[in-house]
Amino acid sequence: MSTRYFFFGTLLDRDVLELVLARSVADGAFVPAVLDGYRRVRVRKDSFPMLVADPDGSVEGRVFETRSAEEDARILFFEDFDYGLLPCRPSTAGGIVEAMFCGIDTAVEPSDEPWDLEVWAARHKPGFLKLSEIYMNCFGRMTPEEAEPIWEQGRLDLVARGLL
């Protein structure tokens, strides 16, 4: 079993994706794509993005296909209970494909600030990788709800140290 995802945020970063999947990801694993009808903004009070419906908007991202149900489980754990899988139809050079993206599923608030991968990487990537490593070490041992306090405490510690 595998799932085709449209990545638009931190999972576009190969280091983050490899940490989440616990494996290397080949150069050709990502297919450039564009998803119409949305814009990408930073989540209020955090460094990662969310998509907001915008009929005139479009978001550049990449399509990625997992290899197994465990990889799907790892991605869903990483995205935790704040995000739910939503179907989408991004455009690639080969045409429109059926995929899923992780959309906000709870009352997470968007900011007005557009989100950019390069800007995020320059400012937040090292701390985010450390936080993601701590959180992904909970995979298979806890539910996302049980691991959320570990994420939150780690985030607060890293913010206090100026790393996030």
Image (cartoon, rainbow, N blue to C red):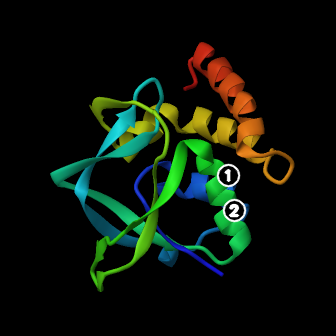
Say if 73 sits above or below 79 in the image. below
Q: Which amino acid does label 2 sit on?
A: Ala
Figure quadrant of the N terminus: bottom right
Q: Crowding at label 2, few (<14), some or many (≥20) Cα neighbours within 10 Å?
A: some
For mark 2, what is the residue? 73
Say if 92 sits above or below 160 in the image. below
Q: Position of residue 155 (x, y in %)?
A: 63, 26
Q: Residue at x 62, y 16 (%)?
A: 161
Q: Residue at x 39, y 46 (%)?
A: 117
Residues at circles 2 and 1 in contact by the CB criterion of under 8 Å: yes
Q: Give the quadrant of residue 160.
A: top right
- Tell me the element at label 2: helix
Q: Position of residue 134 (x, y in %)?
A: 75, 38
**Mark identifier at residue 77:** 1
**Mark identifier at residue 1:** none
Q: Give the quadrant of residue 20.
A: bottom right
Say if 130 sits above or below 35 in the image. above
Check the image and name the residue furthest to the top: 160
